[in-house]
Image (spheres, helix red, strand yellow):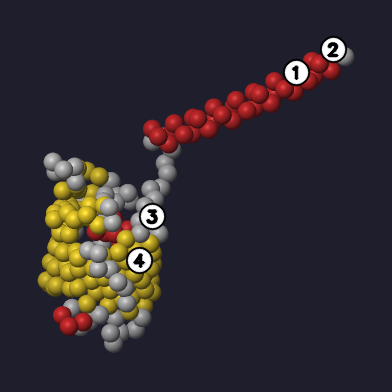
Amino acid sequence: MMNLLINRNKARYGRVLKGARQGIATLFFALCIASGCVSTPPMQTLSYAASGKVRIVAPTGDQVLRFRWRQADGYFDVWLWGALGVGRTHLQGTQEVLTITAPQQPVITGPAGQLMQDRLGWVLPLDALGAWLAGSPALSLPMSSSTTGPDGRLQRMVQADWTITFADHRQVDGQWRPERIVIQGRGITLDVSIRHPRAVMS
């Protein structure tokens, strides 16, 4: 009888000890994530839509384009076109792979950066661009500095080798969004004017 009680107590103690070890391990893992000792990839599942005009100053020349931008869970659907709808170009895909459809050109699919360089003459980080258009920092890029106004809204920030300024904020669906964004870096400048909430996609 005594042996049976001892065995039961040992088994119970073993279960308690195992549970305590699991709890400590979970707590340690959570603390590691918070302190940065565990590397976790940043995720930014932003759903956002906007339309407007962008002036692009690049080594290949200056151009002014209209655009319609839509993204959801890392998937992008972007239209670009010139005056009177000339040169209407459609970009669809993710940060890694894009499909570009342009007038009188074959539809091509491939690495996003390479396709943008070949077809547009410049490259932008699509996942970061979506966050910037919404007036937010991109989680995929490190933040070097940032400036906020007296109202607490973000006015300027530097991420990687890009400098982004925000102006003319307007409240859209309960959130303050910039209607003027200037993005500078890697030899190009984008001066973006956004019209909210017009974001109907074709």
- Name the quarter where the C terminus is drawn: bottom left
User: Crowdedness of circle 1 by 10 Å Cα count: few (<14), some, many (20+)?
Assistant: few
Please say if 170 is above or below 110: above
Label 3: which secondary element: loop
Q: CA distance from mark 3 to mark 1?
A: 49 Å
Q: Which mark, by number, is residue 76? A: 4
Q: In the image, what residue occupies the spot 75% across and 18% down?
A: 9
User: Crowdedness of circle 2 by 10 Å Cα count: few (<14), some, many (20+)?
Assistant: few
Mark 3 lies on residue? 45
Which of disc 1 and disc 3 is earlier in sequence? 1
Q: CA distance from mark 4 to mark 1?
A: 60 Å
Q: CA distance from mark 4 to mark 2?
A: 70 Å
Q: Which mark, by number, is residue 62? A: none
Q: In the image, what residue occupies the spot 17% across and 68% down?
A: 54
Mark 2 lies on residue? 2
User: Crowdedness of circle 4 by 10 Å Cα count: few (<14), some, many (20+)?
Assistant: many
Task: Spot the residue most to the top.
Answer: 2
Residue type of the residue flagged with mark 1: Asn
Please say if 153 is above or below 24: below
Judge left or right: residue 133 versus residue 193. Answer: right
Q: CA distance from mark 3 to mark 4?
A: 12 Å
The answer to whether the residues at label 3 and label 4 have Cβ atoms under 8 Å apart is: no
What percent of the width, then of the height, locates residue 68?
26, 70
Residue type of the residue flagged with mark 2: Met
